Image: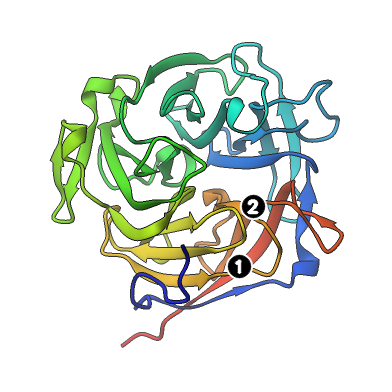
Amino acid sequence: MISGKPPYPKSPVIADAVFAPASSIIREAVGSDNWPITWADDGHLYTSYGDGWGFEPVTERKLSLGFARVEGMPGAFRGVNLRTDSGEREGDGPAGPKTSGMLCLGGVLYAVVRNVANSQIIWSEDHGRTWEWGFRFEESFGCPGFLNFGKDYAGARDGYVYLYSSDGPSAYEAYDQIALARVPREQIRQRGAYEFLVSSEAVWSADIARRGPAFSYPGNCQRLDVVHHPGLRRYLLLLGYGQRGAWGIFDAPEPWGPWTTVFHTDDWGLGDTHGYRLPSKWIDERGEAVHVVFSGRTHEGVEYDAFCVRKLTLRPAAAT
């Protein structure tokens, strides 16, 4: 269910979103997808891949859930697989656990794992070598993503961590709205510490049944990524309307809105792409460049089921 009209008015802050030519897209770790990503305290990006073998040299077996470190900047990065008995999982498609969001806070990597009945919080205190598995959400939050806020969450607006999800139990269905949770940053591992957005007036409740929409687009809310852009002082939501190349970028002054539209398409022109991410390390605070990480399927002979990187220029609106 996709309409040609975006669900929110045009952004007053970002005038235009211009992608570099498709021929410039960098593709590594061909055969793997998913790629939630975070900027850690050691200066590297950490990510997770699904249904594949990761970066060269590839793993000896196909993983549903694998981890990697990405060193360097766009155009000159290097991906390194992180092997971990406590974190890796096997399976395929909906039958295999996969991460939907990652965050580094205080040197600890956190991830949310989908396809395990709603989703489950896990964490690593040694940059991905070992993982501990925590609680599961009992309702909604089937495919969550963390709000990333700079290196090691250092630029955070307050003492909370924010977690968004399409408002349903599955990563493979599109829902009507996005739900938003927050938790004190010291209590991410404790289910009882989470509160849920009730209304756009920033009303919160510990009762998940009282949750309201943080974002609405009936029939089109599926996989997502959220990041703070320090130069624009805006929160950017990347939302896939499905897995066929229809998606959008939305911005807001607060984590819960009000949202406006930066970019919206029913067809990105690259076939069945999905999983759009915006690594905070690769945001140029002094310029207009960001870089989108995504994956997909083969289209016109090009394999996009990979760690795909495409430059995006966000042109600010003229000052008034």
Query: Type of residue at label 1?
Result: Leu
Q: Quadrant of the C terminus?
A: bottom left
Instruction: Identify the residue shown where x is 41% and y is 72%.
Output: 6
The percent position of residue 118, horizontal first and vertical second, equals 41, 29
Image quadrant in which you'd find residue 167: top left
In the shown orientation, is residue 7 left or right of residue 43? left
Question: Alpha-carbon neighbours of circle 2 within 10 Å: few (<14), some, or many (≥20)?
Answer: many
What residue did someone put label 2 on?
294
- Whether 257 is drawn above or below 46: the answer is below
Question: Alpha-carbon neighbours of circle 1 within 10 Å: few (<14), some, or many (≥20)?
Answer: some
The percent position of residue 136, horizontal first and vertical second, equals 38, 21
- Between residue 29 and residue 178, name the one nearer to us: 178
- Whether 159 is drawn above or below 28: the answer is above
Colour scheme employed for the rendering of this structure: rainbow
Task: For marks 1 and 2, give the CA distance.
Answer: 12 Å
The percent position of residue 242, horizontal first and vertical second, equals 53, 54
Q: Are marks 1 and 2 in contact (CB under 8 Å)?
A: no
Q: The residue tagged with tag 2: helix, strand or loop? A: strand
What residue did someone put label 1 on?
312
- Whether 209 is drawn above or below 280: the answer is above
Mark nearer the N terminus (1 vs 2):
2
Query: Type of residue at label 2?
Result: Phe
Instruction: Identify the residue shown where x is 36% and y is 69%.
Output: 7
The percent position of residue 158, horizontal first and vertical second, equals 25, 43
Image quadrant in which you'd find residue 250: bottom left
- Whether 18 is drawn above or below 24: the answer is below
Image quadrant in which you'd find residue 254: bottom left
